[in-house]
């Protein structure tokens, strides 16, 4: 594998792994609306 | 509307469902072949350009349109498109958003059946490759099994002899699909993908670790090692970037991989609430797809093939296409793994089956939603009708197997050509008829992230222009030959007639739905904008 091959592979993997990790962290950090059981609430 | 309102159980549920729809066999089999044949690592330059200029913007447009349709109580692609485009033309063009997933499902479930049949064989002792034989003999043995499972040698072959195994497997796979669609969104599809996606990731990780630790299995052939295998996939050839075909291949790969222009995202997003986020959800679903495609598909398939088959063997395997690589060559590669053969083979095909079923589930959902919306039938009744249509389509696929002519024809017209067309229709209606300012506002209603403003320009100008160039290029490259092939054999002719029959059915259902919803006072032409 050439040096450029390593660079392309590493950059691509960092992008997809890092991007996915960032997205899911952000999704999980965002508070989810709680479901109100029937009979409760106004 | 008298029916109980369907909705997603959680925000992660809809993300995983869309990601599951996008992650399919193409991530593991088509992507590495396309990359290796079009500049290796350099392919990733046009690939990521297409992701940011085509895949993500069109995806966001679809999520936004779907959620907007849902606000008005509309869920089928024709009715949602009718609201976005304010009229009948958009509504009937939206029929493509149901034709595509339903048409593709006729053969996709068949291919899904292969993965399941291979998995069953691997867990019950293997597919009959003699590990002690030479590579030529092993390739012939693998080819023989492939032929038996796919019935590629003749029409009706699957209903005779050992090939009945495929039909039995199909019955199971189809029943699983229908069961989860029948259960509905949150209890069926969402529940299934919430288990299937993590399991698929674990399977992929195990196979990846095994492949990356193969080292140099044959000391007599020191060049056939993992690092050189990775180099085969990733070493960049910049001369490929000067070839229009490379850019076309990259755009096509992004396009089909992300499931944009497929009609599924619109339907799935229509069950979200008005204040739900679609910006981050769309990005997360796309990122997940890219992880499976680049992070797993780009690392496993060709590396494993190179280590055992060498440069010429891998190049030959790539030339046979995705199915030749996945179902014919890789079993030969697994046979070189000694005691691990059946474990890795089983994991690989189980992972492919999960990738396939999470996609096929999404193909039935839009047509069930469309029928339910048009007729006000129950989920059960609508699923039963779609199951009957699916069975007829599948029986045709199972019978007309010679040379794969039937499903190759449906795949080209419905699974490729119409996807380009629908995506163009969608992005043009979104940016130019619904209005980019209004669309941008809808995209950010309840959004967890702010999409960079440059994408507003990309969605209105760049994505449609890019798509038109790709569509014209693709038509010039493929249309002539495909027009000839599409009427050349019995299987191909039946495939064309099947497409027409499904189209007629969908137009009739849309007409019925249009009348019913109008009579019920639903604002299907979006005369009063939803908040």
Image (spheres, coloured by chain):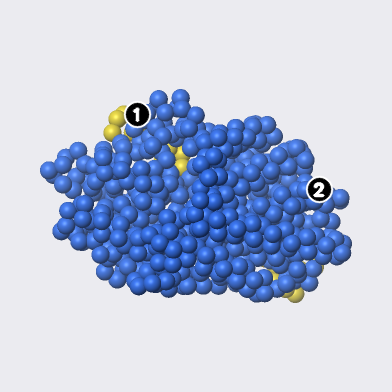
> From mark 1 to mark 2, how far is it between C-alphas?
51 Å
In the rendered structure, the answer to whether residue B122 lies left or right of residue B1 reads: left
**Residue at the extreme left:** B220
Residue where numbered disc 2 is placed: B86
What residue sits 20% from the left and 61% below the top?
B130
In the rendered structure, the answer to whether residue B137 lies left or right of residue B393 reads: left
Chain coloured blue in this rendering: B
Q: Nearer the viewer, mark 1 or mark 2?
A: 2
Q: Secondary structure at mark 2?
A: loop
Quarter residue B466 falls in: top right
The hue used for chain A is yellow
Residue where numbered disc 1 is placed: A4
Residue B409 position within the rendered picture, expressed as x and y whole percent measured from the top left: 52, 52
Q: Is residue B139 above or below residue B302?
A: below
Query: Which of the pair B60/B172 is nearer the observer?
Result: B172
Q: Secondary structure at mark 1?
A: helix
In the rendered structure, the answer to whether residue B277 lies left or right of residue B321 reads: right
In the rendered structure, the answer to whether residue B238 lies left or right of residue B256 reads: left
Query: Which of the pair B377/B165 is nearer the observer?
Result: B165
Crowd rating for badge 2 (residues with CA inside 10 Å; few <14, some 14–19, many 20+) = many
């Amino acid at each position: 594998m050439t040096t450029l091959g390593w660079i392309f592979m590493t950059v691509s993997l960092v992008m997809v792994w890092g991007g996915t990790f960032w997205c899911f962290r952000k999704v999980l950090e965002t508070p989810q609306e709680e479901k109100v059981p029937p009979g409760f609430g106004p | 509307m008298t029916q109980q309102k369907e909705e997603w159980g959680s925000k992660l549920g809809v993300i995983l469902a869309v990601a599951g729809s996008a992650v399919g066999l193409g991530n593991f089999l088509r992507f590495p072949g396309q990359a290796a044949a079009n500049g290796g690592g350099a392919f990733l330059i046009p690939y990521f350009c297409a992701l940011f200029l085509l895949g993500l913007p069109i995806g966001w447009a679809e999520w936004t349109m779907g959620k907007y349709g849902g606000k008005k109580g509309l869920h089928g692609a024709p009715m949602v498109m009718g609201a976005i485009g304010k009229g009948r033309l958009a509504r009937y063009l939206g029929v493509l958003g149901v034709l595509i997933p339903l048409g593709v499902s006729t053969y996709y479930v068949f291919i899904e059946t292969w993965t399941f049949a291979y998995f069953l064989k691997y867990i019950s002792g293997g597919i009959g490759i003699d590990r002690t034989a030479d590579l030529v003999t092993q390739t012939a043995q693998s080819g023989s099994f492939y032929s038996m499972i796919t019935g590629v040698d003749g029409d009706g072959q699957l209903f005779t002899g050992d090939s009945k195994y495929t039909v039995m497997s199909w019955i199971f796979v189809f029943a699983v699909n229908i069961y989860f669609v029948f259960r509905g969104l949150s209890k069926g599809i969402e529940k299934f993908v919430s288990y299937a996606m993590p399991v698929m990731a674990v399977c992929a990780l195990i196979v990846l670790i095994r492949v990356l630790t193969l080292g140099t299995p044959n000391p007599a052939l020191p060049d056939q090692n993992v690092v050189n295998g990775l180099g085969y996939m990733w070493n960049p050839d910049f001369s490929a970037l000067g070839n229009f075909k490379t850019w076309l291949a990259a755009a096509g790969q992004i396009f089909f991989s992300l499931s944009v222009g497929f009609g599924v995202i619109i339907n799935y997003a229509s069950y979200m609430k008005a204040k739900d986020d679609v910006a981050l959800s769309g990005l997360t679903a796309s990122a997940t797809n890219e992880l499976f495609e680049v992070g797993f598909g780009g690392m496993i398939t060709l590396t494993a093939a190179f280590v055992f088959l060498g440069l010429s063997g891998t190049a030959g395997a790539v030339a046979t296409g995705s199915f030749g690589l996945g179902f014919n060559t890789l079993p030969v590669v697994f046979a070189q793994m000694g005691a691990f053969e059946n474990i890795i083979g089983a994991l690989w095909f189980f992972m492919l089956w999960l990738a396939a079923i999470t996609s096929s589930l999404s193909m039935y959902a839009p047509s069930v939603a469309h029928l339910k919306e048009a007729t006000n039938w129950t989920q059960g009744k609508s699923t039963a009708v779609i199951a009957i249509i699916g069975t007829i389509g599948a029986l045709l696929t199972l019978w007309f197997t010679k040379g794969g002519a039937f499903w190759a024809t449906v795949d080209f017209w419905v699974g490729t050509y119409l996807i380009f067309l629908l995506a163009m229709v969608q992005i043009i209606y979104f940016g130019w008829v619904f209005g980019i300012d209004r669309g941008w506002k809808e995209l950010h209603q309840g959004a967890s992230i702010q999409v960079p403003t440059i994408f507003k320009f990309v969605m209105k100008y760049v994505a449609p222009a890019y798509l038109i160039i790709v569509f014209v290029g693709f038509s010039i490259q493929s249309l002539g030959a495909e027009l000839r092939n599409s009427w050349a054999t019995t299987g191909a002719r039946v495939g064309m007639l099947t497409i027409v029959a499904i189209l007629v059915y969908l137009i009739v259902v849309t007409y019925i739905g249009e009348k019913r919803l109008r009579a019920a006072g639903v604002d299907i032409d979006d005369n009063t904008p939803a908040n």
